[in-house]
Amino acid sequence: MCRSVFHCFKYVCWTFFCKDIDIRIVFSSFKIKNFFSFKDPIPDALKSLVVHQFTCAGCNSRYIGETSRHFATRVKEYLSSDKNSHDYRHLNGSPSCKLKCSVDCFKIVDLAKTRLVLNSKKRSTSAA
Ligand SMILES: [Zn+2]
């Protein structure tokens, strides 16, 4: 049963005239916006749920860590207050390393969308 004149015409046209025609898409629209993001990139310091690596500028020791908070907040803790972290203990155990290291010794090596994924990524990064 036809819902409208147009629908009926389309049905008749398809049934009687177009049945054996192989229809292919010959044109698809191209949108420039697909190549650009409208969002500003998040600076590394403000990224959260990250796996990060500390590479000592003095002795090239490496430590892998993860945080679900802002990256810059965690790095600041490593450098000044988190006495239980390997990074803090390394830097305070070796004055020459502490002199050479700064925020630049920390870099983000991976990002995650959830804490569960973050933990698994840290484990796989540490094992590599
Ligand atoms: Zn060192």
Image (cartoon, rainbow, N blue to C red):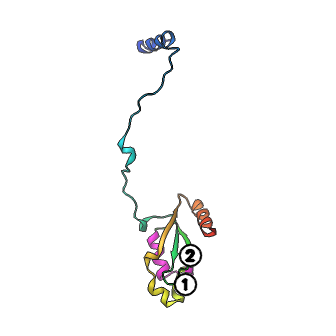
In the rendered view, would you say 61 is above or below 11?
below
Pointer 2 residue = 63
Near mark 1 (Cα within 10 A), the count class, few <14, some 14-19 or many ≥20, is some
Query: Label 2 to label 1, Cα distance in Å?
Result: 10 Å
Task: Name the spot of residue 1 as percent of width and height, x first.
Answer: 51, 11
Picture disc at residue 90: 1
Percent across and percent down for residue 61 are: 55, 80
Secondary structure category for the residue under label 2 = strand
Residue shown at 39% from the left, 47% from the top: 35
- Quadrant of the rendering where the C terminus is positioned: bottom right
Residue drawn at (49%, 86%) of the image? 97
Mark 1 within 8 Å of ligand 1, using the beta carbon: yes
Work out whether 31 lies above or below 82: above
Residue at coordinates 41% horizontally, 12% vertically from top-left? 5
Q: Is residue 61 above or below residue 107?
A: below
Query: Magenta includes 73?
Result: yes
Image location (x, y in percent) of residue 103: 43, 76
As shown in the figure, which amino acid type bears the numbered disc 2? Tyr
Label 2 C-beta lies within 8 Å of the nearest ligand 1 atom: no
Q: Main secondary structure of the magenta part?
A: helix
Q: Which structural element holds mark 1?
A: helix
Q: Nearer the viewer, residue 90 or 55?
A: 55
Which residues make up the magenta segment?
A: 71-86
Residue 124 is covered by the magenta coloring: no
The amino acid marked with disc number 1 is: His
Q: Is residue 21 above or below residue 47?
A: above
Callout 2 crowding tier (Cα within 10 Å): few <14, some 14–19, many ≥20: some
Instruction: Return the residue found at the far bottom.
Output: 95
Pointer 2 and pointer 1: residues touching (CB < 8 Å)?
A: yes
The mark found on residue 113 in the picture is none
Going from the N terminus, do you reach mark 2 or mark 1 first?
A: 2
